[in-house]
């Protein structure tokens, strides 16, 4: 075995921790690779490609019997893995050439809202509602789990309530402080988000965090919970506040849309859409966010099905803490935190952003 092909996945994970990486990829016919500050790069340029035998040995070395059996039956397995120096979201898939292994490195310390750059003056009031829906959205790897964990931990210290988190898998461990916190893992403690959410409603919760709202049943139950006196936090893979509202509405059958629009307009508290943008100095990533707070004007847009007017309402709602993604990107660029190329690439309206940046 080459000196670059380590005998156990923990060796790669230690390197990932030491060099501040977000992900480790161990794939057949590819060199060991890491994602560092958003860029996917080989850990060693001169390392040989991993063979099918290498990745099988690595997979067998850290998978417990239940996970290995599930991998053989289903062809993929996704779970939380922990070793002496950290926690990880692990995924192993069977593909044409062999096994591919991917780890998301979880920062075991829950960071505060201030540390990750959330506008606390506007986020904190959302957390003090006793009911309603707060959504954190963005693409894979945009820091949604980190944001949710920081909000949940703030509630954990700020209130005296019962918090239930439903996750796939559990990433951040949140010990009970002033609140009683229960964390349940889908596939380990329950079979689906919808089943877990239905069970959670019988557990006298005040706050429910739903790791992913990806289907009609889960979204419907989350909305019902938000309406019936629970504060619900959830995530969606959408890139803007307006698209998030559309996604929630679009999962429902057409004949239910009018009723659902009214439910959403009344129960929605706020939406935080986010991106992590590589910093101009190459040292880490900066948080760009779009924030929507449900004002009477926003509620009216949702109720009347005029979601195309939401960006305009956000533009005029700065006093309530609202900000468009493009304005957040401009602020990061003007502060010298991100490059013009990244500012343009990540923007919604490229024409206006080009004019702002002076690019022809």
Image (cartoon, rainbow, N blue to C red):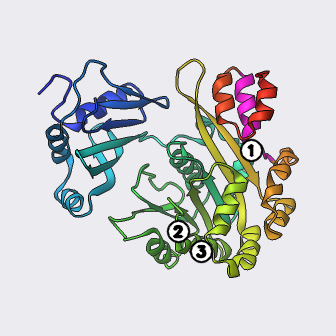
Magenta region: 321-335
Tell me, yes or no, whether the highlighted magenta stretch contains residue 45: no
Query: Circle 2 sits on which residue?
Result: 215
Between 149 and 272, the one lying in front of the other is: 272
Most extreme residue toward the left, as rendered? 1
Residue 9 position, x and y percent, is 23, 37
Circle 2 residues within 10 Å: few <14, some 14–19, many ≥20: few
Task: State the SS at label 1.
Answer: helix
The kind of secondary structure the magenta stretch mainly shows is helix
Quarter of the rendering containing residue 357: top right
Quarter of the rendering containing residue 34: top left
Residue 93 position, x and y percent, is 29, 51
Tell me, yes or no, whether the highlighted magenta stretch contains residue 332: yes
Residue depicted at x 70% and y 63%: 129
Query: Circle 1 sits on which residue?
Result: 121
**Numbered circle sitting on residue 220:** 3
Residue depicted at x 61% and y 53%: 238
N-terminal-most mark, 2 or 3:
2
Above or below residue 80? Residue 40 is: above
Circle 3 residues within 10 Å: few <14, some 14–19, many ≥20: some
């Amino acid at each position: 075995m080459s000196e670059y092909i380590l005998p156990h996945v923990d060796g790669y994970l230690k390197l990932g921790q030491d060099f501040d990486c977000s992900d480790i990829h161990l794939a057949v016919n590819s060199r060991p690779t890491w994602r560092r500050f958003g860029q996917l790069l080989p850990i060693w340029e001169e390392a040989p490609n991993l063979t099918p035998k290498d990745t099988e040995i690595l997979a067998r070395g850290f998978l417990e019997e239940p996970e290995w059996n599930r991998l053989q039956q289903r062809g993929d397995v996704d779970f939380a893995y922990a070793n002496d120096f950290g926690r990880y979201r692990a995924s192993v898939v069977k593909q044409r050439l062999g096994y591919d292994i991917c780890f998301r490195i979880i920062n075991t310390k829950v960071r505060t809202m201030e540390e990750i750059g959330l506008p606390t003056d506007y986020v904190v009031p959302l957390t003090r509602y006793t009911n309603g829906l707060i959504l954190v959205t963005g693409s894979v790897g945009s820091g949604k789990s980190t944001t949710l964990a920081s909000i949940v931990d703030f509630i954990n210290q700020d209130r005296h309530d019962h918090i239930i988190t439903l996750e796939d898998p559990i990433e951040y461990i949140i010990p009970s402080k002033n609140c009683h916190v229960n964390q349940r893992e889908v596939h380990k403690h329950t079979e689906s988000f919808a089943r877990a959410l239905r069970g959670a409603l019988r557990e006298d919760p005040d706050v429910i965090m739903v790791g992913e709202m990806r289907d009609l049943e889960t979204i419907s139950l989350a909305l019902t919970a938000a309406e019936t006196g629970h504060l619900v936090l959830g995530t969606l893979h959408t890139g803007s506040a307006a698209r998030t509202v559309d996604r929630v509405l679009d999962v429902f059958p057409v004949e239910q849309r009018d009723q659902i629009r009214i439910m959403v307009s009344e129960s929605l508290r706020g939406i935080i859409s986010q991106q992590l943008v590589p910093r101009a100095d190459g040292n880490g990533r900066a948080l760009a966010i779009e924030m929507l707070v449900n004002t009477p004007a926003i509620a009216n847009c949702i109720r009347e099905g005029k979601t195309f007017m939401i960006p305009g309402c956000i533009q005029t709602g700065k006093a309530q803490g609202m900000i468009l993604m493009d304005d957040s990107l401009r602020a990061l660029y003007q502060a010298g935190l991100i490059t013009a190329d990244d500012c343009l690439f990540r923007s919604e309206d490229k024409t206006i952003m080009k004019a702002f940046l002076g690019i022809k």
